[in-house]
Image (spheres, helix red, strand yellow):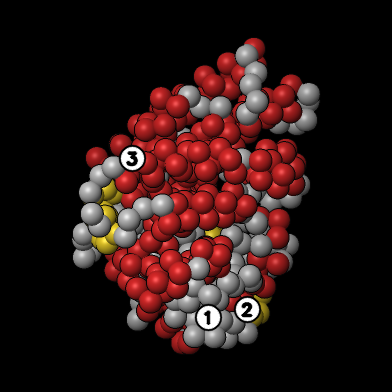
């Protein structure tokens, strides 16, 4: 069985491929991408815990190529210490746990507004009406973006993510370029405006850090703003969508959650494990590395398959079973260590609030399509659309 994360059949359902890799080729060479893949939990966990052996590779920047809206500087996820440490310390200020907790009333308010719109319809698309707008609205407000630009931001974000799948269709590539360019121009203007008209937002905090000579360049602010939008949008959108899709295909598990609201946080953790919104992260080897599954040469690009590690029977009993009572606390859906997902607490908060509202404030619902097209990306996993029909 050949594994290539760019292949349509793998994007559609990677899990049979992951099972093969874990058992037959836990250190696997992907010829088309000239990269290795690690699929067992122990190997992925080791790589995440040892960034000095498996530093960031710059893969995201390289993959986007001419589709990258901010080519001047690497994105935060492609950096290593000391540059990563410096930038992460600065941007962490906008994502402190107490600040995320303080966002809960606002997230609830936005969710109520979106759910009210959804409930007023007999049919509605979850991605268009809830799982897409919610994180986009939250992260846009955190960045200081005007409400009337939310639709543009969602489209720009989706198109830039599409660029990570290395599209070959020139019309698609041009659309990605245009969205990336529009996103860049907007942020450049917003950053400049915040120099004379500060607000209570993350962009203002980053501008102040630059002005206070905290070694933060204008190009770095721009790259951070773009990354925060993409990460804050895509992860939560797909967390919610993957949760609803899997609940509908596992009616017994859906019934358990509906019967016990307190299971929603456990549901969030289980969907992060079972159908991870981020399926892989790239690294490279600082030197030759020998793992239980085999040997990696120095300077190799390595894909850490988070989605495969989270389905490893060696770590999670009956790993291919979706169990809303499992509440796994040691999945690797958000990575680990210095590159642990900055927005993980926010994604969990948004996912919990959205799922509680959908499951307990809406009539019962079902999906009206048998096949749901997947997002064309090697990195994120989620559906493009999820049409629901609500009971009268």
Taking depth in this image into account, of 190 and 221 the one nearest to the observer is 190
Q: Residue furthest top?
A: 196
| x 67%, y 73%: residue | 46
Q: Is residue 270 above or below residue 320?
A: above
Classify mark 2: helix, strand or loop.
helix
- Can residue 208 be seen here? The reply is yes
Q: Residues within 10 Å of mark 3 (few under 14, many from 20)?
A: few
Asked if marks 3 and 1 touch (Cβ < 8 Å), the reply is no
| x 48%, y 76%: residue | 323
Which residue lies under the disc numbered 3? Answer: 117
- Position of 239 compared to 2: left or right? right
Taking depth in this image into account, of 49 and 177 the one nearest to the observer is 49
Please provide percent x and percent y for residue 8. Answer: 29, 64
| x 35%, y 81%: residue | 1
Q: Residues within 10 Å of mark 1 (few under 14, many from 20)?
A: many
State how far apart marks 2 and 3 are (Cα): 45 Å
Please provide percent x and percent y for residue 260. Answer: 50, 68
Classify mark 1: helix, strand or loop.
loop
Asked if marks 2 and 1 touch (Cβ < 8 Å), the reply is yes
In front: label 2 or label 3 = 3
- Can residue 72 be seen here? The reply is no
Q: Is residue 76 above or below residue 352?
A: above
């Amino acid at each position: 069985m050949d594994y290539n994360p760019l292949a349509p059949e793998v994007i559609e359902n990677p899990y049979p491929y992951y099972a093969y890799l874990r058992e037959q080729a836990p250190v696997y060479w992907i010829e088309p991408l000239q990269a290795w893949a690690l699929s067992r939990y122990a190997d992925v966990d080791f790589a995440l815990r040892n960034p000095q052996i498996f530093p960031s590779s710059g893969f995201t920047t390289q993959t986007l190529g001419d589709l990258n809206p901010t080519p001047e500087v690497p994105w935060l996820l492609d950096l290593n210490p000391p540059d990563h440490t410096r930038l992460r310390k600065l941007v962490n200020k906008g994502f402190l746990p107490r600040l995320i907790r303080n966002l809960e009333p606002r997230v609830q308010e936005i969710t109520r507004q979106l759910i009210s719109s959804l409930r007023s319809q007999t049919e509605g698309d979850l991605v268009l009406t809830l799982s897409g707008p919610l994180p986009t609205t939250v992260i846009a407000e955190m960045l200081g973006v005007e409400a009337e630009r939310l639709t543009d931001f969602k489209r720009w974000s989706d198109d830039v993510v599409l660029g990570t799948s290395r599209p070959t269709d020139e019309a698609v590539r041009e659309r990605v370029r245009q969205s990336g360019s529009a996103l860049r121009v907007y942020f450049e203007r917003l950053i400049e405006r915040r120099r004379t008209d500060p607000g209570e937002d993350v962009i203002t905090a980053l501008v102040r850090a630059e002005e206070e000579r905290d070694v933060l360049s204008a190009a770095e602010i721009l790259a951070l703003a773009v990354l925060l939008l993409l990460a804050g949008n895509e992860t939560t959108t797909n967390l919610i969508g993957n949760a609803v899709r899997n609940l509908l295909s596992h009616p017994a598990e859906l019934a358990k959650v509906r019967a016990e609201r307190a299971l929603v946080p456990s549901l969030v953790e289980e969907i992060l494990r079972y159908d991870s919104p981020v399926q892989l992260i790239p690294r490279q080897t600082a030197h030759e590395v020998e793992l239980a599954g085999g040997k990696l040469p120095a300077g190799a690009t390595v894909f850490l398959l988070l989605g495969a590690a989270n389905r490893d029977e060696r770590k999670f009993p009956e790993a291919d079973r979706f169990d809303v009572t499992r509440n796994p606390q040691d999945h690797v859906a958000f990575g680990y260590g210095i590159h642990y997902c900055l927005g993980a607490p926010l994604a969990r908060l948004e996912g919990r609030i959205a799922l509680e509202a959908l499951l307990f404030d809406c009539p019962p619902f079902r999906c009206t399509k048998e096949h749901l097209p997947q997002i064309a990306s090697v990195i994120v996993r989620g559906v493009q659309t999820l049409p629901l029909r609500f009971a009268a």
